[in-house]
Structure formats: structure tokens, C-alpha cells
Amino acid sequence: MQADSGIGTPLALDVQDAMRRRRMYREFDERPVPRELLERMVWAATRAQQARSGVRNIVVVDDPVLMATARQVLPGFLSNAPAMLVHCTDTVRAREVMGRRGVESATWIDAGAACAHLALMAQTLGLGTCTVTSWSQPAVQALLDLPDHVRADVTVAVGYVPAAPSPPARGFRTSWHHNRFGSMFGSGGQG
């Protein structure tokens, strides 16, 4: 990505390096995230795969009062992030174009892909993210005034990372298998 001038200047970013450095942040500094950067984040989410058009909705939340309420009613929202993006699925539209199976599987995969795009875009904008999946659906429905047919899938906290962030959590590991479970592949997930 070529850098340009002005607020939210994207940084040149090698995708492999970005994936290596990507992490969840639970501490953010106090600065609000400008609308222009939130718009770029939403754009990034829209570039992720989606099984069918018209199913995905993204709610951008940056009102300080609403954010304070979110921290009160969403038990997994542990950060002091000044903004959040909530990926939602229109379940009626999804059922119309994909059937029950699409609502139960494809839309969750699409939400995960959107979150990955958000995390990569955040790095180019000098922001950090934290994906939050622990909350009560009725609480999110009420908090965001979501219609009954719109399901919140995942919430992503967004903000500027402090100059000296907490060290990243260690110990996460994924085992790699080749052809069959139990047959080690490559470095076995150590890299």
C-alpha cells in the first residue's frame, strides 16, 4: 500500500510481517479514533469474503456514553477502547439467499474473515484491535437497537495503542497435521 498525506495515512505494510506482528490489544490510549479511520476500517471489513451480498451489516460505535454502556453490559469487552465495530448478519436475508445452513455456518465464517481484514487494516492506520465474542445477544440487540432479524456476530474494539503497550500474551499454539490428525506437518505450529 502506498502512503499518502493527511490524517489516517496508510503505512506501507508487508502482509506476512503484519500477520506475524498482529495481536489483540486490551489497552488503548484516550484519543478518539477519527471518523475517516473508522470508515477505512469498515471498508476493510467489506473487502472480506461474504457468501452473499446484502447479508453483512456493520455498526460503528464511537459515542463515549454508548461505549461506557457497552463496557457495562458486554462481559467480554474488557478494554478501554474509544470505538468498536460490530459485525452483524441480516438473518432473514441470509436465509433467503443461502438457506438455514448459510445462516448457521457461512455467516460466521464471513464474520471471522471481516475481523481478520479489520486487524490488518488497523496496523496500516496505526491502530490496534481486540476481537470480542463474549456477550449476551439480547444485551447487544438492546444496546445497538438492532432489529430482531439482525444478529450481532462479533465486536471489534478499536483504538490507538499506547506508546508502551502491555506485552502480548504468550503460549498460544496451533498444531499442524499432515493428511491425518497426529502426523506432524512442517514445524508443527511452532513458527
Image (cartoon, grey):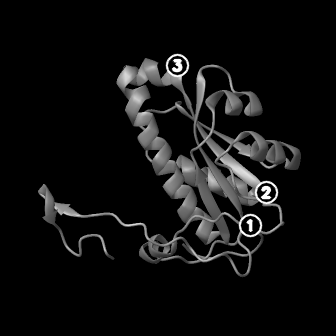
Residue 92 circle label: 3
Nearer-N-terminus badge (3/2):
2
Residue 7 to residue 134: above or below: below
**Amino acid type shown at disc 1:** Phe
Labels 1 & 2 near each other (Cβ < 8 A): yes
- For mark 3, does the 10 Å Cα neighbourhood hold few (<14), some (14 to 19), or many (20 or more) residues? some
Q: Mark 1 vs mark 3: which is more N-terminal?
A: 1
Task: Report x, y in % for residue 151.
Answer: 58, 29
Alpha-carbon span between mark 3 and mark 2? 31 Å
State left or right for residue 119 relative to residue 173. Answer: right
Q: Amino acid at mark 2?
A: Pro
Few, some or many residues within 10 Å of mark 2 (<14, 14–19, 20+): many
From the image, state whether disc 3 or disc 2 is nearer to you: 2
**CB of mark 1 within 8 Å of CB of mark 3?**
no
Q: Residue at x 52, y 31 (%)?
A: 55
Secondary structure at badge 3 equals: helix
Q: What is the spatial separation of the Cα atoms under label 1 and label 2, in whole angstroms?
A: 8 Å
Q: Is residue 178 left or right of residue 60?
A: left
The residue under label 2 is 82
Residue 64, given in percent of the width and then of the height, sits at 86, 50
Say which residue appears at 69% left-offset and 54% top-offset: 78
Q: Which residue is mark 1?
A: 28
The C terminus lies in quadrant: bottom left
Q: Secondary structure at mark 1?
A: loop
Question: From what the image shows, is residue 38 above or below residue 104?
Answer: below
